[in-house]
Image (spheres, helix red, strand yellow):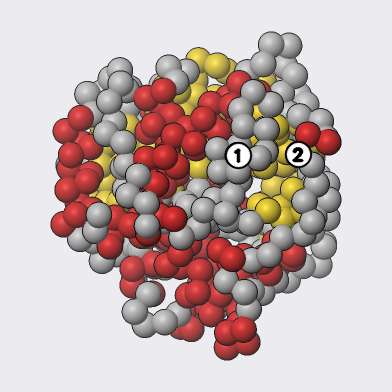
């Protein structure tokens, strides 16, 4: 496995030190690395209900931190987070735990923009992940606990990069919700630091294994695919008894989207679950050959800056196996983290110049974070609009004057 293939699937082991330094400055040199941060005392997973809403502190009205970039539609978005427990599946990374426990953030359209906006993440989780609480000052655009707008919504599942929090997909989640989708971003427990209700933070138990276990990528892809399938089960349960009161999803219009390892998991989830009608991979090495997709559409969105022949060959092989509508677009000036919030947050905090010289190009490229986000939102939105909503999406058919930096790799 090439070095580039490794970092495309496991962003944290390469990025954590650079991001800590960038976000916290020289004082972060003594901060704990994200992958090895300690946790609060553990609570028994089965001691709480299967769906526990998160009671995170509200964002302060006078917060002065950077704001999640506005969505393209400016439609009001609501959000809530919940702890979900799969009692039918032992935790694959922690065999002594009889149930798989997940944290999920939901975004959805709402009819009212009134109310406090949700926090981006807690100061405690921010400090554990990055060695600073600076990212906790980011202001979101979604109203905490807002009532979902009526109607059945197409569902988009989001899976973050290995070692990265689900919060790194907040900007994508808000954009898709503003377009009319129900969105669920999943933290894959023990693959990153995860904060559960009550302030309990679970560690990344498997961080580091990706460098020593040649089968880790495939194993993790299957674990994540099972997580995504469980979330679908909960959201499509009969009688609208899902974790978000009043949110109804359309079981015939579901897509899976992921960044890095999450992108590989999105493809695997679609291969395993016929309910998933489309999948998108944002710059992730594919660990399991994409077979069994049954002619369903796939979007590949890559950054080639710092890429190696090994990474390119991985996607070339995957491309040949896709039998349905397929799209491969590329942002040559982007880095691996440009498809997540990590890029624009570092830019917004004015700390990109503190990145180590040998890591900045691979992680962030030369494009500005907000510009990379705008391109990701536009092309991903066009793909989902075409294949879940049946809307015209000319952006997918030819180069665009609006995004001249984006090219069609295929």
The image shows residue 203 at horizontal and vertical percentages of: 63, 56
Q: Quadrant of the C terminus?
A: top left
Q: What's the distance in space between the residues labelled 1 and 2, CA to CA?
A: 13 Å
In this rendering, which labeled residue sits more in front, label 1 or label 2?
1
* Image quadrant where residue 250 sits: top right
Say which element carries label 1: loop
The image shows residue 323 at horizontal and vertical percentages of: 22, 24
Residue labelled with disc 2: 45
- Which disc, if any, is residue 95? 1
* Image quadrant where residue 154 sits: top right
- Which disc, if any, is residue 297? none
Q: Is residue 298 left or right of residue 24?
A: left
Q: Is residue 279 something one can see in this rendering? A: no
Front in this rendered view, residue 51 or 57: 51
The image shows residue 55 at horizontal and vertical percentages of: 83, 47
**Residue for point 57% across, 88% down:** 26
Q: Is residue 38 above or below residue 281?
A: below
Front in this rendered view, residue 168 or 149: 168
Label 2 Cα crowd, 10 Å radius (few <14 / some 14-19 / many 20+):
some
Q: Is residue 288 something one can see in this rendering? A: yes
Q: Is residue 103 above or below residue 374?
A: above
Please state the total of marks drawn on the protein image: 2
Label 1 Cα crowd, 10 Å radius (few <14 / some 14-19 / many 20+):
few
Given the current orientation, which residue lies at the most extreme top position?
A: 238
Q: Quadrant of the N terminus?
A: bottom left
Q: Is residue 361 left or right of residue 101?
A: left
Q: Is residue 264 above or below residue 129?
A: above
Q: Is residue 290 left or right of residue 29?
A: left
**Residue for point 69% across, 26% down:** 87
**Residue for point 50% across, 15% down:** 252
């Amino acid at each position: 496995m090439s070095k580039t293939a490794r970092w495309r699937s496991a962003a944290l082991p390469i990025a954590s030190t650079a991001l800590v330094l960038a976000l916290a400055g020289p004082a972060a040199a003594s901060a704990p690395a994200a992958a090895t941060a300690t946790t609060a005392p553990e609570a028994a997973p089965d001691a709480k209900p299967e769906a526990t809403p998160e009671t995170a502190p509200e964002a302060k009205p006078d917060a002065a931190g950077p704001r999640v970039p506005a969505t393209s539609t400016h439609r009001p978005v609501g959000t809530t987070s919940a702890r979900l427990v799969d009692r039918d599946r032992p935790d694959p990374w922690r065999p002594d735990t009889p149930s798989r426990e997940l944290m999920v953030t939901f975004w959805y359209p709402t009819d009212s923009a009134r109310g406090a906006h949700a926090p981006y993440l807690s100061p405690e989780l921010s400090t554990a992940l990055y060695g600073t609480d600076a990212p906790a000052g980011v202001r979101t655009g979604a109203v905490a606990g807002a009532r979902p707008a009526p109607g059945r919504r197409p569902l988009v599942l989001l899976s973050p990069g290995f070692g990265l929090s689900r919060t790194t997909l907040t900007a994508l989640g808000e954009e898709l919700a503003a377009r009319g989708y129900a969105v669920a971003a999943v933290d894959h427990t023990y693959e990153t630091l995860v904060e559960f209700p009550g302030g309990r933070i679970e560690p990344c138990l498997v961080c580091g294994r990706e460098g020593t276990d040649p089968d880790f990528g495939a194993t993790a892809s299957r674990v994540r695919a099972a997580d995504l399938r469980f979330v679908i089960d909960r959201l499509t349960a009969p009688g609208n008894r899902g974790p978000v009161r009043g949110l109804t999803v359309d079981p015939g219009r579901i897509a899976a989207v992921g960044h890095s390892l999450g992108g590989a998991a999105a493809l695997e989830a679609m291969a395993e679950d016929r309910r998933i009608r489309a999948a998108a991979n944002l710059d992730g090495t594919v660990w399991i050959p994409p077979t069994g997709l049954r002619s369903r559409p796939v979007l590949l969105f890559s950054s080639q800056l710092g890429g190696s022949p090994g990474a390119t060959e991985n996607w070339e092989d995957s491309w040949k196996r896709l039998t349905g509508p397929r799209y491969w677009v590329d942002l040559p000036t982007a880095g691996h983290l440009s498809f997540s919030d990590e890029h624009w947050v570092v830019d917004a905090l004015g700390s990109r110049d503190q990145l180590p010289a040998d890591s900045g190009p691979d992680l962030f490229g030369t494009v500005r974070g907000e510009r990379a986000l705008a391109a990701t939102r536009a092309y991903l939105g066009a793909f989902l609009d075409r294949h879940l909503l049946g809307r015209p999406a000319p952006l997918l058919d030819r180069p665009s004057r609006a995004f001249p930096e984006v090219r069609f790799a295929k």
